[in-house]
Image: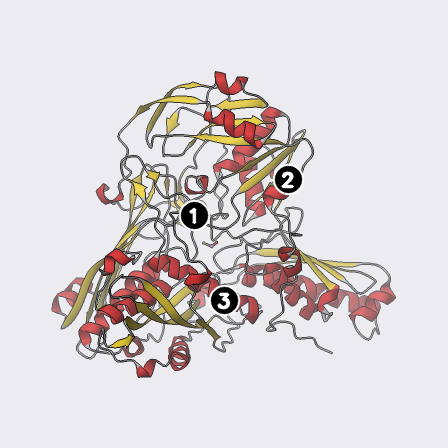
Amino acid sequence: MTIDFIGRPVSRVDGRQKVTGGATYAAEFGVPNMAHAAVVRSTVANGRIISIDTAEAERAAGVLAVLTHRNAPRLAYRPHKGLPDAAVGERLHVLQDNRVNHQGQPIALVVADTLEQANHAAALVRAAYAAETGTTDVTRVEPVLPTQQKTDQGETPPAETRRGDPEGALAAAEVKVDHTYVIPRENHNPIEMHATIAVWDGDRLTLWDKTQWVHNTADEIAAVFGIPAVNIRVVSPFVGGAFGSGLRTWPHVTLAALGARVAGRPVKLMLSRREMYYGVGYRPHTVQRVALAASRDGALAAIVHEGYQETSTYEEFSEALLNASRFLHSCPNVFTRHRIARMNVHTPTYMRAPGEASGVFALESAMDELAVALGVDPVELRLRNEPERDEFKQLPFSSRSTRACYRVAAERFGWSRRDPEPRSMRDGRWLIGWGMATATYPMNYAPASAAARLLPDGTAEVTSASSDMGPGTWTSMTQVAAETLGLPIEQVKFSLGDTRLPRAAIHGGSMTMASVGSAVQAACRKAREDALARAGGANDLTDAMRRLGQPVEASADVTPGDASQRFSMHAFGALFVEVAVDPDLGETRVRRMVGAYGAGRIVNPKTARSQCIGGMIGGIGMALMEHSVVDARNGRITNANFAEYAVPVHADAPPVMDVIFVDEHDPNVNPLGVKGVGEIALVGVAPAITNAIFHATGKRIRELPVTPDKLL
Ligand code: MOS
C-alpha cells in the first residue's frame, strides 16, 4: 500500500499545540533563577559617547550588573560571515567602544532580578555624546556603487548589467515610459518579538532564541565569544512570524549571552515592539527609475532599471532589487544599475521577498503604464513579451508557467469583462478598479541534512534543525517522511529547531521545502530500505520493524548539483486585484484578489494556500499602509509602535482571496520538485493593487504606501 501524503491538505500537526498555548516560544522557556536584561540605546545617530553615568542604575533595587563599553568584557569578534550577513563590511560590535553608528544602538545593558527592575535601572543611565552630523535623510545621500569583492559566498554580484544598446533603443522608441518609484522603509512586525534566554554552564552556552537558523546563531555567537560552536546549543522550536528578521543573528543575542556571563545567572532579554525598529533589520527605502521602450505593437525594445537602497555605514547590504527585470520579460536591450546609500542607520536586511517585492513593484507598475500608453491590455502586453528562455543568463527555464497563470487567474477573476477606461467602473459612489501584475521568485535549494530513526513499535522519529516561522515546516516534513516511509502520518514524529539535530538550510529564501524536504526524503528512504533489507521477507515496514526488534537509524545530506548551470530556475505567478476607492475620502479597499502560481510541486495545498493568503495580505500592507517614518534630523522612527505603524488586520483582508496552483512538474530543480511559495506570495501584490487604483481613479501613484492623502 502506498500512502500519498505529499500533495494532501493535511492540517497542521502542531495546530492544537499552537491554539492551546502548548507551543513554547523563545521568551517562554522558564529557567530557574533567571534574571532579566534591558538595553539602553543611543539617542543620537552618529558620534561618540563622551560620558556615561551608571552610578544611580547600579544602586537601584535588584540590579546585578550594568555593562557599558567601559566595563564590558572585550569580545573576540572573530570574522564570521553567515549566508544572511552583508557580503561587505563588519557587523556591529556591541559595548566594545564609544562609537555610535545609529540611533537606537545599544550603549548599555542592565541585568536585574526582575524585568521591572531592569527597565527602571536602564532609565537611570545617563549618557552624553559628542554628536557628529549624521546622514539620516535618504533623500540627501548620494548613492554610490557597492564594493565589488570576493567573499565567502563568491564574487559580489555586478552592480551594472547591460545587453544590447538600451540607451539607443530608448532614444529611438516609438512609445516609452520613464518614471521613478519610491518605497519607504518597512519594518518586520511579527507578532512575536525577538527574545533570547542565555544560560552558561562553565564554557558551555545554551540559547533559547527566536531565529530562522539555529546553527548560524551558534556559529556567530561562537565567533563573537571566541569559543567552539559545538559548545553552544541553540533551541528554537517555534517562531511566531519573522519574515526575515530572524535570518541574521542580531546584537541582542550577544547582549543576552554577555549579561548572563557577567551576572553569573541565566538571563532573558526580550525586545519591546519599539526596539524591533532599532536592531533586527528592515526592508530598505528604495528609489527606482524604470524606463521602458516599445514598438507600437507592444514589443519591448528597452528596459532601463536603476535603483538604490539605504544601507548602514558599517555594512553594505544589497538586495536583489533588479534581478527580475533582467529576465521576466523578453527584451533585447536591457540596462540595470544597483547602488547603495550609506546612512547612519542600522543595517537593513531581508524582508519577505527581499529585492523582488520592491523591484517588481517598479517593473510591473511601469509595464502597466506602458500598456496604457500603447492602448494594449496589460495581460496581452505581457503575453507579447513572453521570453522563450532566460535572456540574461542565456539558459532555458527549468519550467515557466506564466501563460497558464495569466490564463487561469484571469478566467477566475473575470478579467475579460474589464472596461480598460479609467474611472469607468463604479459601485454606487465607489470607484472600482481592476489591476494585475506578474510575480517571480528564484528557486533556492541549499545543502541540508536530516536523520530518521525507525522504532520496533512501527513509529519513526525524523529530525532536521530547520525552523518554522509559520509556513508549516512541522507538518510538511511529517508528510514527506510519512509518505517516503510508507507509514501512517500519526506514526511519524518530526522535530526541528535544535542545534543537536542535523544541520538544515537557512529557513528563508523559500528554500526550506526544497532543501530540508529533500534531505528528509533521502534519510527516510535510506532508513526504510535498510530496515526492509535487514528484516528480509517482511510484508511492510511496520512488520519489518517488529521483526527486527531494535531501532534502525539513517541520515542523509543533500547538496545541489549542477542544475543552476543548466537552467534558470524560478517560480512564477500572476496577481489580479479589484479595489474600490472612495472618491471623496481617498480610502482604498481591496475587494478581491486572485493569485495563480507555478511553483513546482505543492506538498501541502492547505498550508501553501495559507502562505499565499498571508503574502497577499502583506502586499496590502506594502501597497496601502506600511511606512517606517524616519525623523530625518536624527534617524528616530516616529511610529515605532503598532498604533502608528499600520499593518493590515482581518478587516482589511478582502472577502474573496483565491489561490490557484497550476500543475507544474519540474524534476530539474531538486529531488522533491518544489520551488517554494513563501516569498513569491508577496511579489506582484503591491503593483497589482496600485495598477487597480490607477484603473479606478486615473491616478498613478508611484510612491508607496497609497494613503488617502495621495488620492485626494
Ligand atoms: Mo525570508 S526574507 O528569506 O525570511
Q: Does 515 appear above or below 228?
A: below
Of circles 2 and 1, which is in front?
A: 1
| Residue drawn at x 34%, y 41% as measured from the top left | 638
Which quadrant: the C terminus? bottom left
Is residue 73 visible to the viewer in this orientation of the structure?
no
Look at mark 1 in the image and give the residue it sits on: 642
Give how far apart the Cα atoms at labels 1 and 3 are.
33 Å
For label 1, count other residues whose C-alpha is less than 10 Å away and answer few (under 14), some (14-19) or many (20+).
Answer: few
Asked whether disc 2 touches disc 1, contact meaning CB atoms under 8 Å apart, the reply is no
Mark 3: secondary structure: loop
Residue 361's spot in the image, x, y percent?
Answer: 32, 62
Of circles 1 and 3, which is in front?
A: 1
In this view, the residue in front, 595 or 124, is 124
Residue 512's spot in the image, x, y percent?
Answer: 55, 59
Q: Does 120 appear above or below 604?
A: above
* Mark number, residue 257: none
Left or right: 35, with 135 as reference point = right
| Residue drawn at x 45%, y 39% as measured from the top left | 275
| Residue drawn at x 29%, y 72% as measured from the top left | 433
Three-letter code for the amino acid on which mark 2 is drawn: Val
Look at mark 2 in the image and give the residue it sits on: 230
Three-letter code for the amino acid on which mark 3 is drawn: Lys
Residue 72's spot in the image, x, y percent?
Answer: 51, 23
Looking at the image, tell me whether mark 3 or mark 2 is earlier in sequence order. Answer: 2
Left or right: 425, with 68 as reference point = left
In this view, the residue in front, 624 or 493, is 624
For label 2, count other residues whose C-alpha is less than 10 Å away and answer few (under 14), some (14-19) or many (20+).
Answer: some
Look at mark 3 in the image and give the residue it sits on: 675
